[in-house]
Amino acid sequence: DQAAEGLEAARERVEQVRLLGFDLPSTGLPAGRAVLSFDHAGWSNGERRVLSPLSFALNGPERVAVTGPNGAGKTTLLKLACGALAPTEGRVQRPVSAALLDQHGDALTPGLTLVENFRRLNPGGTDNQARAALARFLFRAEAGLRTPETLSGGERLRAALACALGGDQPPQLLMLDEPTNHLDLDSVQAVERALAAYDGALLVVSHDPDFLEAIGVQREIALARG
């Protein structure tokens, strides 16, 4: 009946909250360590300037938001920071390990289960470690056997976070591109709790001020269009 279903749903939610209270392996990032620097770095696509030259630095476990209107080059900035793009002017330096995650789930290999993806991204990791990491991000039991192409955008982001942060050596710089777009409340809370437990540096593109406050963002890089 409805009462029983409501009780079961409540138990499920309590179980999710219990699973989300967790510790992550330390990144070992010291305070004051140089993490990322842009020295008049910009990027152009032929004649069109996508990201105007800018300079900034991240040091130690800083938490920084990248904001600005659509077309200002926020995603391009993240791609320059992770090395997916090379600047067409200026210089980018990133002397630490890094991961860039978005809802496309590009870090995950289609056709492999989430457990297999975890082990691919964390050599030496065990199935038990993979399942424990995935469970913290709400992929429990048989959900760990799903493949990335069967997941929604929010699920792919959660799975990528589990794989990136659940291993023995999480990246010292984590970059997130619009992580809360189209996420349900449980998924947003999963991401917030994970980032609260993460002790590395964060560079986050987001339009969600509540999310940025919840994850402890300390300063903002505001981009202008053009």
Image: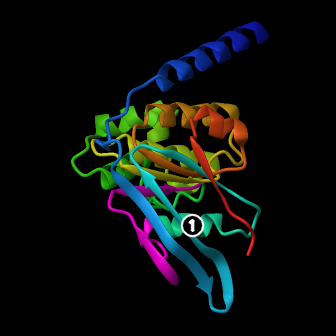
Give the x, y percent position of residue 14: 58, 15
- The answer, for residue 54, to whether it is visible in the render is yes
The answer to which image quadrant residue 29 occupies is top left
Which residue is pictured at 38% across the width and 27% down the height?
Answer: 23
Q: Identify the coloring.
A: rainbow
Q: Which residue is label 1 attached to?
A: 77
Q: Horizontally, is 144 left or right of 118 in the view?
A: right
Residue 225 at x, y percent in the picture: 75, 70
Q: Which residue type does callout 1 highlight? A: Leu
Up the image or down, 63 lies above or below 178; here it is above
Q: Closest to the observer: 32 or 190?
A: 32
Query: Label 1's element?
Result: helix
Is residue 224 found left or right of 191 in the rendered image?
Answer: right
Q: How many marks?
A: 1
**Is-magenta flag for residue 99?**
yes
Name the quarter where the C terminus is drawn.
bottom right
- Quarter holding the N terminus is top right
Locate residue 133, reporting x and y percent. 39, 36
The 10 Å Cα crowd at callout 1, few under 14, some 14 to 19, many 20 or more, is: many
> Over which residues does the magenta segment extend?
82-102
Q: Which picture quadrant has residue 66?
A: bottom right
Q: Between residues 189 and 174, which one lies in front from this camera angle?
A: 174
Q: Position of residue 26 (x, y in %)?
A: 31, 37
